[in-house]
Each structure stands twice: as C-alpha cells, then as structure tokens.
Image: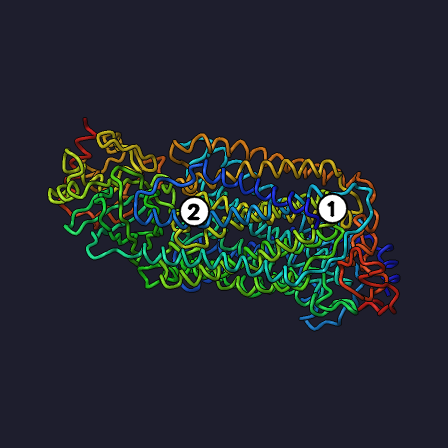
C-alpha cells in the first residue's frame, strides 16, 4: 500500500543504519572503499598468478594487467556500493527479503549519492552526471580551439592535441548526449505512461552507476604513461591497435558506457510494452515515449556491434589476434563496417529522443495538437528501419566494395523523407497556434532551424561525389555539430528546462534561460557555420596545424567558440541557483496534458496515488472538454509492500 | 488563409531565398575546379545547392512567419484550433522531398560513374602512403615524394598504405581516396589547369598527420613527356636529395640543405652532435643504423615513431646516396 510505504520511509530517512563492524559490510561508500582495492588486487594478482603457473615471462605484463583491471576494479566498486546485493542474495538461494523500499526515493541530497532504485532519482543522477561530462568535454574543446587559434604549435604537441580531440568527442557522445537522453527518459517515461517505476528498478540503478565508471575510465586514459587515446573517437584500426596504453582505456570505457546503454534500453522497452496505464494504447502514447521506444530498439540491436569492434581492437593489442592486422590475414575495413553498423544508428540514438522532446514542447507551447500524430510515430519507425541500411555512407572514400556506394547513397537520401515529415509536422503544429516563447520553446524553435541546416548539409554528404570532396574535412565537423549540437544538445536543453519544474519542484529563472538560449544560438552559429567554408576549401579535420591561409577564420572560430563555451556558465548558474532558491513550481506550470504534469512537482514517491485511466491522446489542446486521462480508478496493491 | 497572409508568407520566402542565394554566390565556397572530375563534382554541388535553397526558403518563411504572427502574450490562456492533420498536405510533404532526393541521387550516380572512367589511355601512378609521407611511382619505376601529372590526360592513381589508413586528397582536383594497408584503391584524375597544388592527408594517421603533405605539379602534356623521358629528376642537386624527397623524410625532419622543416623527429642538422651523444660508431654508421633500425638509438626528447621499413623499401644503392647526402649536409 502506497501510504504504508511512504509512512515507512518517513521513519527511515536512510536505510537502517548499521553499526560497528556491520557498517563495513553494509552496502555503501564505506564498503566500496575497501572492496574496490580488493578487486584491484585481484585484477593485478590474477594475470600474474596465471603467468606464473604457465611459466610465461615476464610475470608482470602492464598491458594485460591494465586490461583486466579495467574490468575488475569497476566491478569491485559496484559490489561495494551495493549494485549486486539483492541479486547475490537471491542467487545464493537465501530466503527472499521483503522489499522495504528503503533504497527507493530521495529524502535528502545524500540519497542521490547511493544506489537508488527510484527512476526519478536515477533520472536526476543521470542528467547531473552527464552535464558534468558535458562541461569536461566542452573544456577540452576550449583547449584545442585555443591551439587552433593560430597555425603552428602553440600550447599542445600533436599527441596532446589528438587526445583532446578524441576525448572531446568520446565524452560528448558516450557520456553526454546518449546518457542525457537516457536520463530524461528515465525520469519522464514511467510518469508519462502512468507507471509507478521502471520495470527493473535494480537494473536501472546499475545502468546508472556504470556511467560514472565509463567516464572516469575515459578521462583516466588521458594520463596513462605514453599518452592517452589519440586515434579519434572513431578509433580506426590499425592506428588504434598501435596506440599507447591509453587506447585500452578508450576500448573499455566504451564497453561500460555501452553496457549501461543496452540495459537502460531493455528497461525502457519492457517498461513501455508492459507497464502502460489502463487505456494507454500505443496510439495514445506521447511522442516522447514513441521516440524512446524506437531509440531503445536501435540501442539493443546496434550497441553490441561497437562493443565487438572495441573488443577486436583490444584483442589485437593484448591477445595478438589479427582481426585488423594485414600481416596476419586481417581485414582493415572490417573495423569500419562493424563500427559504423553501430555508429550510424547511434546518430539516430542521439536524435530520436530529441525529436520526442521537441514534439512535447512544440505542442504544449503552441497550444495545439501535434499535426499528423500517427505519421510522426510512423516516421520514427521508418528512421529506425532505414537507419540500419546507411552505415557505409561514412565509407564512401574508404575503399570498400564500390558497388555499395550508390545503394547506400539512395538509402541515406531516403532518410531525409521521414525526417522532413517530422520538421513539416512541427511547423504545421506551430501554424495558427498560440505560441509562448518560454525557454524550452526557444530551444525547440532554434532546434528546428539548426537541424534543417544540418539536414541540408547532410544531403550534400549523402551524395557520393560531393562527399568525396568534403569527407574528412571541416565540412564534416560543421555538419555533425549542426545535427548534434544545434540538433541533439538544443533538444536536451529544451528538455531540461521543460521538466526542470517537475524534477526539482522549482521554477528556473526565465530571463537567464532566454539569455542562455540567445548566447548559445549566436555563439553556436558563429563557431560552426564558417567551418563549412574552410572544410570545402581544403582544411582537413583533426589537425593541430593548418595552412596559413586559414589563420584568420580559425581565429574567428576560436573566439566565437569561447563565447559559446561561456554561455554554459549562464546555464549552470541558473540551474544551481533555481534548484536551491527558485520559485516553487506548481504541478502543471505549462498547462500540458500528458500524465507527468497531472501529479505534484516533484511527483509522489510512487508517482501516482491513483492509477490513471487513459481516455485519449495527450495533445487534445483546443478540444473542449478533452482529457488525456481520468483519475479515480481502483488502486492496485503495490508489489512487495508488507 | 487570407490573401494578405499568403502574400506576406510568399514575400518572406522570397527574402529568405534571396539571402540564401546571396550567401551561396558571394562566398567562394569551393576551391577552383582544376580537373574534369572536380568540375562534375562542383556541378552536383550546385545542383544540390539550388534544391537546398528552395527547402531552406520554405522552412525559413513558415518558421519566421509563425514566430511573428502566432506569438501571444504570456497571459493569453487560450488554445489554438484543434487541427489534427491534413492527409493531402502530409502526402505532399512526403512526396516532394522524395522526388527532390531522387533527383540528387540520379545526378550523383551519373557523375560518380563518369568520374570513375579513366578513358582508353590513362597514365598509371602507384601512390604509397606511410607515416607521414607520400611516394609516387611511375610506370618507368621511378619514385618521387611529390606527384607530377600531365594536363588533359586521365591518370589512374592506385593508392595503398604501408602502415595505417591515410587519405589522399588534392582539393583542386576534388577526388579523394583512403590509402588502406593491404589493398589498392583506384581513383581517376584528369587535370585541366597547370600549376602546383597541395596534396593533403585527410585521415588521422598519428602524430605527424597535420604535416603529412606533399604537392602535385600539373604540366602541359609535352612538358610532362619531356620530364618523364629525362627520368624526371626532381631538381638539380646531389642524388641523395632525390632519395630524401621521394621518401618524404622532410615531413618529419628538419634538414636545411633540403629545405625541410618537419619537427616530429630529430633535427637532422644536428646529426653530428647526435652521433657523438649516441656513440655508436662513425657518423655514416650512425646515420645508416638510424634509418634501417630507427629504434636502436632514440635521441632524448623524441619518441620511437619512425617506420622501421626503410631498410627494405629503399634500394641499397639509394640508401648509400642518402647516408652520404645527410652526412655531408650535416657537416657543412
């Protein structure tokens, strides 16, 4: 019974406090403090022991030990923190512990720093962690833009420059954009479909805790002896096979982040398929739920491929296999085929949830139903299917089978059609509406403009002849930032501002939000638009030094990028200040119809005191008397409550 | 919609199209097209640009019109009309983009086929990439560190790599192709303008990637034939200079006699001093060892990055010329 559970919590603000020796064995940071070094010791000892038993020399092989450590040490940390306690208990055949919900929900800030099974806590943990890595990745960009302000070597040698470029992209992709969407989805999806939580709350908690591990591994790789991973975020073999030790950190960081992605996606799929409130048919789901449904399918199908590609590189390096070693019969382009079979769908993993956010925001702030709701959902599915048939457009100049180029060009071009449908539908939704330009709507509108520009440069790159000229130049850098920054990051900002009142119970500062938008919008365009030009003119990407004729324009880009970086300070200040001192938010400040706005801000610990009965679509603005859901259906017993 | 609104909307679209056209025409987006293939690629570029401007104008017009006309005061609590869709409109905006991208696809596929066609009598040049230099081998067996091409004749470049993936690009010729170890990838270039232009590596290939540059000299066909017959000596100078240049030593090393300014590897002007520090035999012995077995002695402050393949790839006679050339240059 929900009331009972809540009452239970009020008596136990934290899980029952163990005392004395028991404190060392109870899950938490204290246990992590000794279990992590223990597993570290195992990771170092195991290879030595095996090598000793097999008479292999030298006993101490740094490359092997590092690889094993990157598996065991994070596992030790997770074990210490309590990520596996319940499962271990269950697997050992001990009597089932009744779920007391003591690890569920947040009553103080401390609850955000432990294994917590509440999807709302996890959502916030995700968003805050990813914003942290967004800042780190952005800082790297500021550093290498400083280097690029002038031709020649200024601040960094080529090794450091390559590391900064590689880690900038790796952090932004694997530790910011993809998990930021997972975080927003985590918070919002169960609320939107009328569920009390995700289907697998413990798995959900574990998915989150893999993320800081992945991030730390990526960053730690930068300071390894010999230099960090410097083969770009694409880490093409055979270059990546012969990189210094830091490359192993990249290989393993991707594995941890990928595992996190896959587990979250499975959780989303099961939650969306099985836990919708009565009456919530697929055709009544908010488009954000549709978007995360399709994204999760992409993640589950595609992510194992990048895991494979990184394992192969690691095996070539550590086990001396020959996946990509030409001398041993390896196939060099095999890496790119496997890598892009994930990494092209990954660009949809990085934009489809954004499409969902934009649909929610545009409809709410235009006070109109989504135009062509069903076609919007179907176009997501079309992108999902087509997304798997276009990977080789990253390889038009790679020397793959030349017959593949035209078919891959055609499928890439065709993807513009469902994407165009979405853009036109958003425009039609705004048409004749009552537009309120609050910060989320500003970012949504800015997103449409920037994403159309990024989509148009995408058409150029889909065309094989133009791509042959523009491939691997700054034109590509411009394109991916128009779709990933002007696209994905703008939608993440829109989402954060939109759900900030729901997540924190406070309103953000509207004036600061609008200032943030304009600084970002202007800084973004000044930084990235000129890159189209220098790229087409002949400046390749990933170079620390460049021809003197590009000096002036690079100086301009660098200055603009510092402005863009500074705009983030406004965002951080606004978030931090408003979270603490912002005006109290009402349950539904945007007068939106979807379910998350029908409960208090922040929502009750199990989301709904009454299970909603869904009776219509969530976008019936302007329809007199229309409702998305009614409350008052009979209450079911919560699982495991005593 | 009222007639006035339609006029306003169309006017916004025309303004947006005008601005986009101005940006497209006033900025020199593309480098000059000095090859037949480049001219065709530029044609596809402008074909796509016309369509892009049209799409941009439509979106910009609708978006800015909506922002200006449908914006309401914050205290306006009313809702918009409950329009759920319009089947005809949805079919139209699915069909028109489909037609447009089909058109671009067809033009692209035709140009791609034309650009892969080398004609009946192409010149064949083997291009070999390695960290961090290019070498170009002609049918007469001669190898150079830069590319020489005849004007108005197609050349087939067969591109491969010794180590990691590189990418061959001449911006004014537009054609680009990755150099992949273990395979030969072919592109066709047909220059139509004489001059000297940069050759750039566009695939991240390690520390010297930014400096992995060479150049292409495009000559009148007669001049090319003369150059080719004479065995194409790069420039007057000691024979060791040609070996130095054809193996791309200058992209990593500084060596004043050759005008080389690379800074990835040790400064070869200081070879005498290095040889003393290393104390591994005479100056020529030291130089020879450092080329065929670069890991034997690493000058402090530098990393063990130099390919160890030069011992096999440079014929012994040429290697001796190179060693003599370096020893003499370093002493002077």
Give the letter of the chain under mark 1. Answer: A
| Image coordinates for residue B110, horizontal then vertical, percent | 37, 58
Q: Residues within 10 Å of mark 1 (few under 14, many from 20)?
A: many
Label 2 marks which chain's residue? B
Q: In what element is the residue under mark 2? A: helix
Q: Using the image as rendered, state which of residue A165 and residue A483 is in the foreground.
A: A483
Is B170 placed left or right of A536 in the picture? left
B307 to the left or right of B207: left
Residue highlighted by disc 2: B46
Is residue A269 placed above or below A471 in the rendered structure? below
- A546, B46: nearer the viewer: B46
Q: Quadrant of residue A186?
A: bottom right
Q: Residue at x 74, y 61 (%)?
A: A190
Classify the position of the N terminus of chain A by image quarter.
bottom right
Mark 1 element type: loop
Are the two marked residues, 2 and 1, in contact with CB atoms closer than 8 angstroms?
no
**Which quadrant of the figure has residue B108?**
bottom left
Label annotation for residue A435: 1
Give x and y (percent) for residue A388. Answer: 51, 64
**Mark seen at residue B114:** none
Residue A77 visible, this angle: no
User: For the C terminus of chain A, which image quadrant?
Assistant: bottom right
User: Which of these two is toward me, B31 or B215?
Assistant: B31
The span from disc 2 to disc 1 (Cα, nearest Å) is 37 Å
Q: Is residue A212 visible?
A: yes
Residue A604, image x, y percentages: 83, 56
Mark 2 packing: few (<14 Cα in 10 Å), some, or many (20+)? some
Tell me residue A462's x, y (percent). 46, 54
Above or below, comparing residue A151 to residue B112 in the picture = above
**Left or right of residue B311, residue A19 in this image:** right
Q: Residue furthest left?
A: B230
């Amino acid at each position: 019974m929900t009331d009972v559970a809540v009452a239970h919590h009020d008596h136990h603000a934290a899980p029952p406090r163990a005392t004395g020796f028991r404190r060392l064995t109870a899950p938490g940071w204290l246990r992590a403090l000794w279990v992590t070094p223990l597993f570290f010791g195992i990771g170092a000892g195991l290879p030595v022991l095996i090598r000793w038993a097999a008479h292999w020399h030298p006993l101490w092989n740094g490359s092997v030990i590092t690889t094993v450590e990157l598996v065991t040490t994070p596992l030790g940390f997770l074990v210490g923190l309590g990520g596996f306690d319940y499962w271990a208990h269950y697997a050992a055949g001990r009597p089932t512990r009744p779920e007391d919900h003591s690890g569920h929900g947040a009553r103080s800030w401390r609850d955000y720093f432990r294994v917590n099974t509440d999807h709302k806590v996890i959502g916030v943990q995700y968003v805050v962690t990813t914003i942290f890595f967004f800042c780190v990745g952005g800082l790297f960009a500021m550093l290498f833009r400083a280097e690029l302000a002038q031709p020649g070597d200024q601040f960094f040698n080529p090794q450091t420059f390559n590391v900064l470029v590689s880690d900038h992209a790796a952090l932004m992709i694997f530790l910011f954009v993809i998990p930021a969407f997972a975080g927003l989805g985590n918070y919002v999806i169960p609320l939107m479909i009328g569920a009390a939580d995700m289907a697998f709350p413990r798995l959900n908690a574990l998915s989150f805790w893999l993320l800081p591990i992945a991030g730390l591994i990526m960053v730690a790789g930068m300071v390894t002896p010999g230099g960090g991973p410097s083969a770009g975020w694409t880490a093409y073999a055979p270059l990546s096979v012969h990189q210094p030790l830091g490359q192993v950190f990249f290989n393993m960081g991707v594995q941890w982040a990928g595992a996190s992605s896959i587990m979250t996606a499975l959780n989303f799929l099961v939650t969306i398929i099985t836990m919708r409130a009565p009456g919530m048919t697929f055709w009544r789901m908010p488009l954000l739920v549709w978007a995360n449904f399709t994204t999760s399918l992409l993640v589950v199908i595609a992510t194992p491929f990048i895991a494979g590609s990184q394992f192969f590189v690691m095996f070539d390096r550590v086990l001396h296999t020959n996946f990509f070693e030409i001398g041993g019969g390896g196939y060099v382009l095999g890496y790119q085929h496997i890598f892009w079979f994930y990494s092209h769908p990954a660009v949809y993993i990085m934009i489809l949830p954004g499409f969902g956010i934009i649909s929610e925001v545009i409809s709410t702030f235009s006070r109109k139903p989504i135009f062509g709701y069903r076609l919007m959902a179907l176009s997501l599915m079309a992108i999902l299917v087509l997304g798997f048939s276009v990977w080789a457009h990253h390889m038009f100049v790679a020397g793959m089978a030349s017959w593949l180029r035209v078919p891959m060009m055609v499928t890439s071009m065709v993807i513009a059609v469902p994407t165009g449908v979405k853009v036109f539908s958003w425009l039609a939704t705004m048409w004749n509406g009552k537009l309120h330009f609050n910060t989320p709507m500003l970012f949504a509108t800015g997103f449409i403009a920037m994403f159309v520009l990024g989509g148009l440069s995408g058409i150029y790159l889909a065309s094989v002849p133009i791509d042959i000229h523009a491939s691997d130049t700054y034109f590509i850098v411009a394109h991916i930032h128009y779709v990933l920054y002007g696209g994905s990051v703008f939608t993440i900002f829109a989402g954060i501002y939109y759900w900030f009142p729901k997540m924190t119970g406070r309103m953000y500062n509207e004036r600061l939000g609008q200032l943030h938008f304009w600084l970002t919008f202007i800084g973004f365009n000044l930084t990235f638009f000129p890159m189209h030009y220098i790229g087409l003119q002949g400046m390749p990407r990933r170079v620390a030094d460049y021809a003197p004729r590009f000096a002036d324009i690079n100086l301009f880009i660098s200055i603009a990028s510092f402005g863009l970086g500074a705009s983030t300070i406004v965002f951080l200040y606004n978030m931090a200040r408003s979270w603490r001192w912002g005006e109290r938010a009402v349950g539904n400040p945007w007068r939106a119809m979807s379910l998350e706005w029908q409960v208090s801000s922040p929502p009750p610990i199990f989301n709904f005191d009454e299970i909603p009965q869904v009776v219509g679509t969530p976008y019936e603005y302007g329809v007199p008397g229309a409702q998305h859901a009614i409350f008052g259906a009979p209450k079911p017993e919560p699982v495991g409550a005593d | 919609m009222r007639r006035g609104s339609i006029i306003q909307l169309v006017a916004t679209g025309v303004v947006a199209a005008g601005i986009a056209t101005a940006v497209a025409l006033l900025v020199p987006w593309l480098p000059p097209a000095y090859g037949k293939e480049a001219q065709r690629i530029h044609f596809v570029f402008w074909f796509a640009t016309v369509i892009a401007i049209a799409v941009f104008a439509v979106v910009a017009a609708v978006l800015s019109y909506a922002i200006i006309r449908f914006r309401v005061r914050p205290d306006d609590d009313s809702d918009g009309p409950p329009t759920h869709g319009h089947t005809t409109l949805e079919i139209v905006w699915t069909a028109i983009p489909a037609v447009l991208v089909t058109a671009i696809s067809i033009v692209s596929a035709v140009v791609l086929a034309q650009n892969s066609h080398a004609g009946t009598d192409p010149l064949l040049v083997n291009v070999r990439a390695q960290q961090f230099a290019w070498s170009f081998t002609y049918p007469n067996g001669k190898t150079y560190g830069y590319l020489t091409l005849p004007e108005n004749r197609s050349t087939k470049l067969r591109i491969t790599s010794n180590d990691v993936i590189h990418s061959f690009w001449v911006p004014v010729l537009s054609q680009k192709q990755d150099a992949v170890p273990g395979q030969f990838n072919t592109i066709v270039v047909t220059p139509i303008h004489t001059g000297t232009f940069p050759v750039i590596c566009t695939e991240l290939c390690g520390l010297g990637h930014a400096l992995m540059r060479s150049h292409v000299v495009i000559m009148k066909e007669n001049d090319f034939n003369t150059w080719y017959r004479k065995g194409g000596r790069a420039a007057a100078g000691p024979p060791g200079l040609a070996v130095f240049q054809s193996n791309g030593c200058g992209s990593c090393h500084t060596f004043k006699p050759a005008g080389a300014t690379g800074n990835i590897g040790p400064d070869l002007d200081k070879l005498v001093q290095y040889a003393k520090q290393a104390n591994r035999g005479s100056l020529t012995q030291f130089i020879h060892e450092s080329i065929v077995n670069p890991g034997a002695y690493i000058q402090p402050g530098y990393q063990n990055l130099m390919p160890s393949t030069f011992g096999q790839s440079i014929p012994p006679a040429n290697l001796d010329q190179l060693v003599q050339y370096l020893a003499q240059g370093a002493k002077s």
